[in-house]
Image (cartoon, rainbow, N blue to C red):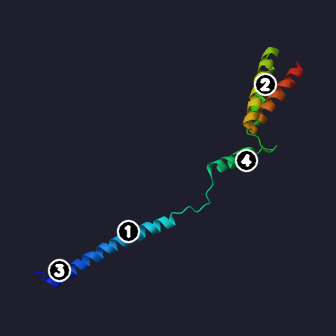
């Protein structure tokens, strides 16, 4: 049996245990919050978009080519088989695509269509 002094000690131990659990939880929450802070400085979404646009606007160097040379060689062979009307259709189509690529600032595409247009022009001049 518990005496009155034993009952008081048990209640004190239970209160101590309760405070220990509560303060431990608070400590864990606060330490997680302090460590969970962002390491990089905050950048607004509009600023991120601006940085991406600047990166995308870089024009490719003259040495780089997104298209293999063999594609242009096959194209030269193909346009030799076309009549003048077909070449005109292709010229108009490639000019339109080049203009759209310029608006999108897709410089690899612009370079590609420019090269195709040059090949078509040379082919027309040769006929």
Q: Nearer the viewer, residue 67 or 55?
A: 55
Q: Is 20 on the left or on the right of 108, as rendered? A: left
Left or right, 7 with reference to 107: left
Query: Along the horizontal axis of the image, is 30 left or right of 16?
Result: right
| Place of residue 50 in the rendered image (x, y in percent of width and height, measured from the top left) | 69, 47
Q: Residue 82, position in %: x, y?
A: 78, 17
Foreground disc of the pair 1, 4: 1
| Alpha-carbon span between mark 1 and mark 4 | 47 Å
Which residue has dot 2 on it? 77
Q: Residue furthest bottom?
A: 5
x and y percentages locating residue 99 in the rendered image? 77, 30
Reading the image, the residue beneath label 4 is: 54
Determine contact: label 3, label 4, CB under 8 Å: no
Question: Pointer 3: residues within 10 angstroms few (<14), some, or many (20+)?
Answer: few
Q: Which residue is pictured at 66% across the width and 50% down the height?
A: 47
Tell me how far mark 2 sits from mark 3, CA to CA. Answer: 102 Å
Q: Residues within 10 Å of mark 4 (few under 14, many from 20)?
A: few
Residues marked 2 and 3 touching at CB (< 8 Å): no
For label 4, the SS is helix
Earlier along the polypeptide chain: callout 2 or callout 1?
Answer: 1
Residue at 17% over, 83% down: 6
Q: Which residue is mark 1?
A: 25
Q: Nearer the viewer, mark 2 or mark 1?
A: 1
| Gap between marks 3 and 4 measured at Cα | 74 Å
Q: Residues within 10 Å of mark 2 (few under 14, many from 20)?
A: few
Rate crowding at label 1 as few (under 14), some (14 to 19) or many (20 or more) other CA atoms within 10 Å: few
Q: Residue at x 62, y 52 (%)?
A: 44
User: In the rendered structure, which disc, 1 or 4, sits on the residue that comes first in sequence?
Assistant: 1
Q: Nearer the viewer, mark 2 or mark 3?
A: 3
């Amino acid at each position: 049996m518990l005496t009155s002094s034993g009952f008081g000690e048990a209640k004190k131990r239970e209160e101590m245990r309760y405070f220990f659990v509560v303060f431990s939880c608070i400590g864990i929450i606060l330490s997680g919050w302090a460590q969970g802070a962002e390491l990089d400085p905050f950048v607004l979404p509009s600023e991120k978009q601006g940085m991406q646009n600047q990166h995308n606007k870089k024009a490719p160097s003259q040495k780089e080519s997104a298209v293999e040379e063999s594609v242009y060689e096959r194209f030269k062979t193909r346009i030799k088989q076309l009549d003048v009307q077909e070449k005109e259709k292709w010229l108009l189509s490639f000019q339109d695509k080049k203009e759209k690529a310029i608006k999108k600032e897709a410089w690899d595409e612009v370079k590609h269509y420019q090269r195709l247009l040059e090949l078509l022009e040379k082919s027309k001049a040769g006929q």
